[in-house]
Image (tube, coloured by chain):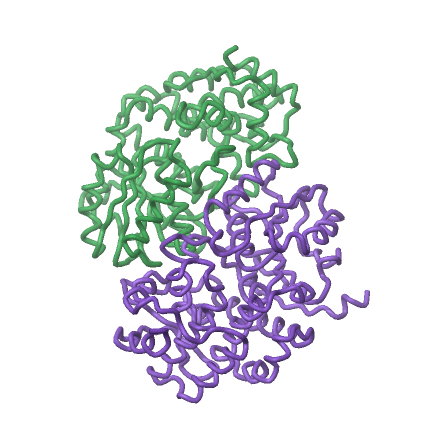
Chain colours: A purple, B green
Amino acid sequence: MPQTALRDQVEIDLGDRSYPILIAADLLGELDAFDAAPSASTALIVTNTTVAPLYATALKATLAKRYHRVETLVLPDGEVHKDWPTLNLIFDALLGHGADRKTVLFALGGGVVGDMTGFAAASYMRGVPFVQVPTTLLAQVDSSVGGKTAINHPLGKNMIGAFYQPHLVLCDLATLQTLPPRELSAGLAEVIKYGPIYDMAFFDWIEANVDALVALEPSALAHAVKRSCEIKAEVVAQDERETGLRAILNFGHTFGHAIESGLGYGEWLHGEAVGCGMVMAAHLSQKLGGVDAAFVTRLTRLIQRAGLPIVGPALGAERYLELMRIDKKSEAGEIRFVVIDQPGSAKVAAAPEAMVREVLAQCCEA
Amino acid sequence: MPQTALRDQVEIDLGDRSYPILIAADLLGELDAFDAAPSASTALIVTNTTVAPLYATALKATLAKRYHRVETLVLPDGEVHKDWPTLNLIFDALLGHGADRKTVLFALGGGVVGDMTGFAAASYMRGVPFVQVPTTLLAQVDSSVGGKTAINHPLGKNMIGAFYQPHLVLCDLATLQTLPPRELSAGLAEVIKYGPIYDMAFFDWIEANVDALVALEPSALAHAVKRSCEIKAEVVAQDERETGLRAILNFGHTFGHAIESGLGYGEWLHGEAVGCGMVMAAHLSQKLGGVDAAFVTRLTRLIQRAGLPIVGPALGAERYLELMRIDKKSEAGEIRFVVIDQPGSAKVAAAPEAMVREVLAQCCEA
């Protein structure tokens, strides 16, 4: 099979919870791409109103060759629905279909679908297997890999969830061709992220190829997905449950989560908030001595070229600080940030409140 | 310290998730009983309206010597509240108090409080530590040990949850002295259970001491709790996530869960439904050739002496079968039961539907 030869594969090495990420165009239709998915009598595809018309039929046709019964559940689209009532629709569907402990869930969609399907799989009957089939760039390079699952709480993003690994991640690059430009840019934020925190050679490559990425050039996207997954795999294998190193993957996310929940979920896309949050985190890193002004400018410029916002919304410093205190990295009320300690390397650090206020004044609309 | 010498201790051996069960009277007031609880700045006691007036003040006073801030959340009492809205009260409280990833949850109460607090701990920020402080016999001998946490779904009991181990289980035997007789009997169902499935010598002991147990005689209760925890520890250590052996602990539960959800949660106590369910499961075991009629009579008699119902409610066979098909042991629509294959030993087995209907006809009100 000639297409099989073109597949990239990245392994997530977590002992008995290890699994492969397959990366190639048109995987949805290839039966053998699903070899790592567990056997069962029943499969449930969880997707949303945007993705279902595009890809649910193709995925269902392939899975029908592997599972006796394949059901599909279509959720409403958007971060605002990453909540308990929508999660409960998955449980209702599972129980309504008489799904047992071996039923396999397939998350077909972006980060919201993946996070919710993963948490449903972690919790239904205390755990059933699931497979990630990410159809957005953000999900392919970040959220579908590594086993973080969650829903939002009105008071904080991703506050209720589980570390729960999929059995397989299947990145069909062809699905990226239908991405709206805004969603593509949101995904590029998480691609860019891997440069300053881990790999400046990749950062150089992104700078040289950002126009090709924005133009959905297939070979550029293929490399961006593969290298991002490799880096994420290396980090997650060292620290599955984020007791240390893994936190660096949240570069830009402390500011970003505050933007998302401060504006109301879904107002900015997660990747947009992270893009802008990285600009803020870069300024903070400079103030802490990790990088110079030229680096901040360079990162800001790349984020802008990716089509992302670089100025934060005017929530007011008090509100930003209040929201950031709820962040999962906080300890005993002290906000902690992922900062660059030198280009290509990051760490978690507290910062004086006055310094954070300076960054907010510098980086947000008045 | 003379009291320390009187403590029983049972270890749950699960590698890096191992933890001790301490068993003694008046542990709530003894600071060193909490040595295995993780350090943190904040602790949250989760309890209910029945238990709070009895023991929350004492627990809080002890924890205040160990944690900078100790908050208390009082939930409504009863199985009918083992649901998402009530679980969400725990998340609201945690976020409202600014609880971070190190915050320790203390479940003070019976099985419902323990199951919900455990699932909240498993899910809040994808996992914070928790301690079980069971105050009912049922929770001390069964539900607080082994890491099963869950909430109910309208369509099935314990359908949404996690395997998530506590850091410590603290069985204060003095709390059993305030148990209403009905709650005590419900706990005895889970004590009795360990005999037919695992240890007929313990079964003999229970038969000889059931009157002392019903009369809340401290040394009888102490032995019942200790031996039950030992057996549960042996089973759970071999099969933490119930891929095999652990299922035997659900003897009587397939019928019992159907009674609970068929009547509406809270109508019968969980232990009452399990007691009656064991009578049915014993009849089924006899039909499958595992035990004789004398054994069924002997078990039924003991369950009755413990103050438990031995005749099932008249839900109708169709409704029983429908409810039991949702059981977590079901596979591809086939109901599976824990049956006694010889006194002191159990296994999971399917049974012909006609045989199950005979048992229902024999054991339920017309």
Near-viewer residue (A70 or A155): A155
Where does the image place residue B1, in percent across and percent down from the top left? 17, 47
Where does the image place residue B70, in percent across and percent down from the top left? 23, 51
Number of numbered markers: 0
Where does the image place residue A218, in percent across and percent down from the top left? 69, 73
Residue at x-position 41% and y-position 38%: B83
Near-viewer residue (B169 or A7): A7
The correct choice, above or below, for B228 with respect to A186 in the image is: above
Can see residue A115?
Answer: yes
View extreme (front): residue? A366
Can see residue B239?
Answer: no
The correct choice, above or below, for B92 with respect to A198 in the image is: above
Where does the image place residue A29, in percent across and percent down from the top left? 74, 57
Quadrant position of residue A286: bottom left
In the image, is A192 to the left or to the right of A242? right
Near-viewer residue (B346 or A205): A205
Quadrant position of residue B28: top left
In the image, is A290 to the left or to the right of A75? left
View extreme (right): residue? A1
View extreme (top): residue? B366
Residue at x-position 57% and y-position 80%: A206
In the image, is B186 to the left or to the right of B288? left
